[in-house]
Image (cartoon, grey):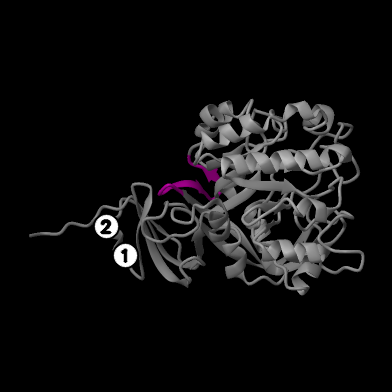
Amino acid sequence: MITRPPGYDLILKGGTLLDPAQGINDRRDIAFKDGLVAQVAKRIDPASGGATVDVSGKLITPGLIDLHGHFYHGGNAISVHPDQMCLPSGTTTGVDAGSAGFENFLAMRDYVFPAHRTRLLAFLHIGGVGLALNRLLGGGLHDMRIIDVDQTADAIKDNAGFCFGVKVRMHVNAVAYWNAHQAMKSARAAADQSGSKLMVHVSGTPIPLPEVLEYLGPGDISTHAFNGNPESILDGRGKLRPEVRAAVDRGVIMDVAHGGVCCDLEVVKASMEQGLLPDTISTDIHNPPPAGSPVDQTAYLADRIVYPMNDLVSQFHSLGIPLVDAVAAATSRPAQVLGLQDTLGSLAVGMSGDAAVFDQQEGRFIWHDMAGHSVDGHVRLDTFLTVRAGTIAWREGHLTQIGEC
């Protein structure tokens, strides 16, 4: 009896696989079939695949997972085109952080997200229309009647696998301080009723950060955790607040959500020196508000830099995080936060066929924050190839297919 080759759809050959979930950092060939990882081995016969790409000398990682971005393209002005922003950075999964609420997420689910190759998931805003009013009013919770806990919880429960939790913006422009606790209670209630997670924007909070953290439990997400506003994770002496340590100890996720203005490199350095590293690296990728809009302020400059995922992994590696840990914070760790570790965040056989291939460029690279701080690095991950569901989705500056929405 003759055994024929399995007929893989795609083989990546000759690269170094860095897969923190499997503990692999070594040369591997990877084969994909029917959208999944079909084989990982030291050598795979190229004749067994329909297409083989030589990635010798390059770094292969699982497709990056951006836990906080704004991808409701066309649904509001803040949201970016997912494929144009994600695939060139090696990002294969983007999680929308509250761009829509229960009143307006159906178009996101049924029309906008399916039009793109990037896998797109969502947290629903506790406000019924998400961020649709931000450009007009400067925030979404000026009128608390926009919150409906039951309808938000029902929308999340009815859309398991698409909606993963509730997002609330604790920002002075988004909610008045006298309504902040009620907004937090409502978001907590919606998350509890739906059996999902709570994600809280903690940069520029109108109430003390310790009071916000009281509402967060294991698996909930403090996003923009490393911001440089007065109510940051550091106290007035530059020490980590005990309430922050307590939150971390009970399993609260500390997420970067860089956003250009929501990550202060000096806060990151001080935190790392005291033993607290980011759990997850994410972008808060979005279109900045125009000058003169209700949300325009000194910190919100139209030309501010919002870094993509490959830059942020490189940046945090330059801050002293081992590359394997920086990659984990952008792959296996966010997959665990979402409860999707059985399908995403690794290139083990049977997992989703999402991969990123990077050139490790050497030189001098400088990353900035909006507080005037910077970090110098000597290695930058430049995307060479992005594989989504077992096929090439982006290669050397070209999207192979693009959504029209």
Which residue is painted at 15% across and 59% down in the image?
A: 3
Residue 248 forms part of the magenta stretch: no
Image quadrant holding the N terminus, namely bottom left
User: On the image, which quarter does residue 171 sit in?
Assistant: top right
Relative to 154, is 370 above or below? Answer: below
Q: Main secondary structure of the magenta part?
A: strand
Question: How far from the left and from the top, in percent, is residue 65?
Answer: 57, 52
Kind of residue at disc 2: Ser
Q: Is residue 352 above or below residue 150?
A: below
Q: Which of the pair 145/280 is nearer the observer?
A: 145
Coordinates of residue 199 in the picture (x, y in percent): 68, 47
Q: Position of residue 120 (x, y in %)?
A: 55, 41
25 sits to left or right of 253: left
Q: Quadrant of the C terminus?
A: top right
Horizontal side of 336 relative to 230 (left or right) equals left
> Is the C-beta separation of discs 2 and 1 under 8 Å?
yes
Q: Which residues are magenta?
A: 388-400
Instruction: Work out whether residue 311 can be spotted.
Output: yes
Element assignment for label 1: loop
Foreground residue among 316 and 272: 272
Q: Secondary structure at mark 2?
A: helix
State the residue position of label 2. 48
**Disc on res. 55:** none
Task: Count residues near mark 1 (Cα–Cα under 10 Å), then give few for <14, some for 14-19, many for 20+.
Answer: some
Residue hosting label 1: 44
For the question of whether residue 257 can be seen, the reply is no
Question: In the figure, 386 relative to 267: above or below?
Answer: above
358 with respect to 300 (left or right):
left
Q: Is residue 286 above or below residue 62?
A: above
Q: Position of residue 85 (x, y in %)?
A: 62, 43
The kind of residue on which mark 1 rests is Ile
